[in-house]
Amino acid sequence: MSAVLDLPKTTSISKIYKAVDIVREQQAAIILSNVAWETYNQFVEETMDKIVNPLFYYENENLLIMVKSSEHEFITDYIVLFINFVSVEWSINCGSLGSTTYRKDDIKRGFEPDSCFYFENEPKMRGVKRLDMSVHPAPDLIIEVDITSLSTFRQHIFAHFGVPEIWRFDGEQIEILKLENGKYVAVENSLALPLVTPEKLTEFIKESQTLSRLEWINNVRTWARKIKVENE
């Protein structure tokens, strides 16, 4: 569910807070139009480290406010687990900044991913305590749990930041998307974890619905070891 509220360009911070309350109450998503970049920045500064749900996405004076449901959180958690354990089994360094707020003044866009990871750029992010997009790179991989069909809005922002890869769950399956010529296209293997396919990711997410957490983790680790040996 989503709605568009057309507010004056001088939208006050209090009106954004009100929209946040509506989103939480209705477990939905709202797009506020005519929100100035300065207003968005002020809101982020006021609420940084205080509001972890919903998430916020800003582009072209539109502010998307999207609540994270229990299903949303569950799926994100298991995808993050998958990445962490597979990376360990394959001896691949990675680092996560979770749902950190990303903002760039030069393109006037901002977002908070469901989760995100650094692989190639992981060394550059070690020890970073406060993100500065004039210095730091965008994530190498973004996790997107999109049960509300707002992917186009979000992915357009990710593309402007130059995020090379997205793992997107649509409520039924996961697709792996690669940035090509400013747009995301579906591919058969991950860039960050090349032996991972959309089919295998979807299979493991389905298993997470019925297996205990420990059983599921053991299955992931067993698979990761097996496929590593097969491809050596």
Image (cartoon, rainbow, N blue to C red):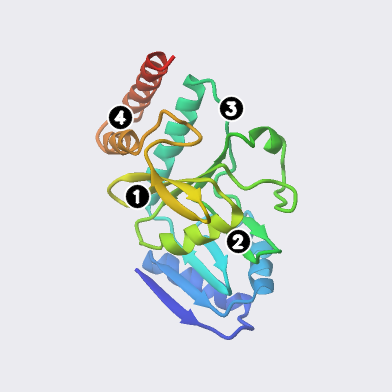
The residue lying toward the viewer, choosing from 22 and 61, is: 61
Q: Residue furthest bottom?
A: 8
Circles 3, 1 touching at the beta carbon (< 8 Å): no
Q: Give x and y (percent) for residue 1.
A: 34, 68
Q: Earlier in the sequence, mark 1 or mark 2?
A: 1
Q: Earlier in the sequence, mark 3 or mark 2?
A: 3
Front position among marks 4 and 2: 2
The numbered mark, 3 or 4, whose residue comes first in the sequence reads 3
Q: Are marks 1 and 2 in contact (CB under 8 Å)?
A: no
Distance from Cα at disc 4 to Cα at disc 2: 36 Å
Please identify the quarter of the rendering in which residue 22 is found. Answer: bottom left
First in sequence: mark 1 or mark 4?
Answer: 1
Quadrant location of residue 160?
Answer: bottom right
Amino acid type at circle 3 is Asn
Return the x and y of residue 88 as percentages of the image width and height. 51, 22
What's the amino acid at mark 4?
Answer: Ser
Per the image, the residue denoted by label 3 is 93
- Mark 2 neighbour density, 10 Å: few (under 14) some (14–19) many (20 or more): many
Question: Amino acid under label 2?
Answer: Gly
The residue that label 4 is drawn on is 212
Q: Nearer the viewer, residue 70 or 100?
A: 100
